């Protein structure tokens, strides 16, 4: 991995530090200030390294990284694309990502088993004002099955039980006058992004293949509920979706702005995801 400092240092005593070489595990070492990162990375650390870079402060200008092609296509996927997933939404919250070029496995001797792609990552400046835990909590639910309507997803007992538990906890914190425990929509912090890096750890290359799996049924059984049909909390959740015209929408087609709007509607109704 090559980290490059700004060209304005050229001709100054700092010129010898224009490029930095650090020996060590990139996931464990502290990275210095840098403007540009160019890297051909081991693909198994794709998520962790990407979110480590995105949590680095001060924010870098640009990273050009080679990934396994399917991972790269998921990073840059747009709403409606078949590979659009939680990884795309979370990365694009923090950065503008663009696909630069495909690199066939036949460009290497011996050829590896997979094709590659080079992607450019430019962190957003400023970062959006959102609690990342809240954001990812919402996105996680919406992508349990990305082609299912949000109305159907949020009706699941497991989802309602989880949200009602958060809701009641926050209500009692408010009543007990302990607002510190209450999650507010605030500026994204590097702590938030570290949370993200850990969450992303379980977004494996197989994530896209899970879209028609049984995760929603798993949630139903894992989080058993006493909630009766037509309970007032369920009505509250459905009311939020209706207010934003989200009942018949599907995560596979929602943009960043849609997710931010939906999160703001839930939070306004006192419903939180973390
Ligand atoms: C240039 S190769 C690219 C390999 C190819 N993209 C792949 O995934 O098989 C990656 C280089 O990163 C090094 N490497 C592996 N894990 C690392 C880590 N955690 N920190 C720093 N370098 C690492 C390897 O020794 C290797 O030289």
Image (cartoon, helix red, strand yellow):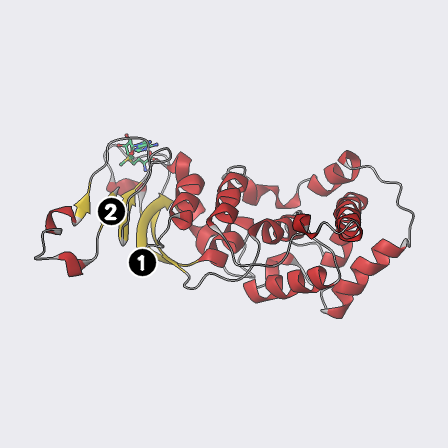
Q: Is residue 272 above or below residue 207?
A: below
Spatial CA distance of label 2 from label 1 is 11 Å
Q: According to the image, label 2 marks what residue?
A: 3
The residue located at (20%, 39%) in the rendering is: 21
The residue at 50%/60% (across/down) is: 78
Q: Within the image, what quadrant is residue 39 found in?
A: top left
What is the tally of numbered marks visible in this picture?
A: 2
Give the image location of residue 151, x and y in percent. 76, 58
Answer whether labels 2 and 1 touch (C-beta < 8 Å). Answer: no
Could you tell me which secondary element the residue under label 2 belongs to?
A: strand
**Residue sitting at x 80%, y 52%:** 175
- Residue 126 lies, with reference to residue 160, above or below; the image says below
Quadrant where the N terminus sits is top left
Q: Nearer the viewer, residue 61 or 155?
A: 61
Which element carries disc 1, helix, strand or loop? loop
Residue lying farthest to the front in this orientation: 177
- Classify 10 Å Cα crowding around label 1: few (below 14), some (14-19), many (20 and above): some
Place residue 186 in its image quadrant: bottom right
Task: List x then y, in percent, for residue 100.
Answer: 32, 57
Determine if residue 83 is in view: no
Choose between 97 and 272: the one closer to the eye.
Answer: 272
Say the numbered circle drawn on residue 61.
1
């Amino acid at each position: 991995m090559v980290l490059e400092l700004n060209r304005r240092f050229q001709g100054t005593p700092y010129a010898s530090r224009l490029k930095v070489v650090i020996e060590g595990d990139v996931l464990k070492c502290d990275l210095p200030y840098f403007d540009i990162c160019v890297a051909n990375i081991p693909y198994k650390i794709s998520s962790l390294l990407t979110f480590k870079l995105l949590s680095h402060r001060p924010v870098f200008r640009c990273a050009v990284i080679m990934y396994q092609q399917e991972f790269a296509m998921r990073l840059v996927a747009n709403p409606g694309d078949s590979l659009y997933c939680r990884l795309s939404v979370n990365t694009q919250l923090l950065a503008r990502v663009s696909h630069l070029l495909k690199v066939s496995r036949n460009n290497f001797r011996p050829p590896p088993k997979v094709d590659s792609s080079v992607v450019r990552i430019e962190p957003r400046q400023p970062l959006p004002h959102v609690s990342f835990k809240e954001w990812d909590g919402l996105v996680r639910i919406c992508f349990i099955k990305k082609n299912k309507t949000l109305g159907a997803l949020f009706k699941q007992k497991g989802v309602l039980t989880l949200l009602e538990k958060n809701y009641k906890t926050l209500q009692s914190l408010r009543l007990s006058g302990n607002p510190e425990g209450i999650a507010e929509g605030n500026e994204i912090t590097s702590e938030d992004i570290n949370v993200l890096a850990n969450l992303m750890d379980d977004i494996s290359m197989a994530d896209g293949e899970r879209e028609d799996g049984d995760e929603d049924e798993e949630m139903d059984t894992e989080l058993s509920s006493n909630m009766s049909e037509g309970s007032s909390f369920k009505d509250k959740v459905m009311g939020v979706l209706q207010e934003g015209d989200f009942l018949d929408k599907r995560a596979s087609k929602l943009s960043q702005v849609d997710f931010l709007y939906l999160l703001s509607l839930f939070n306004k109704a006192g419903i939180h995801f973390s």
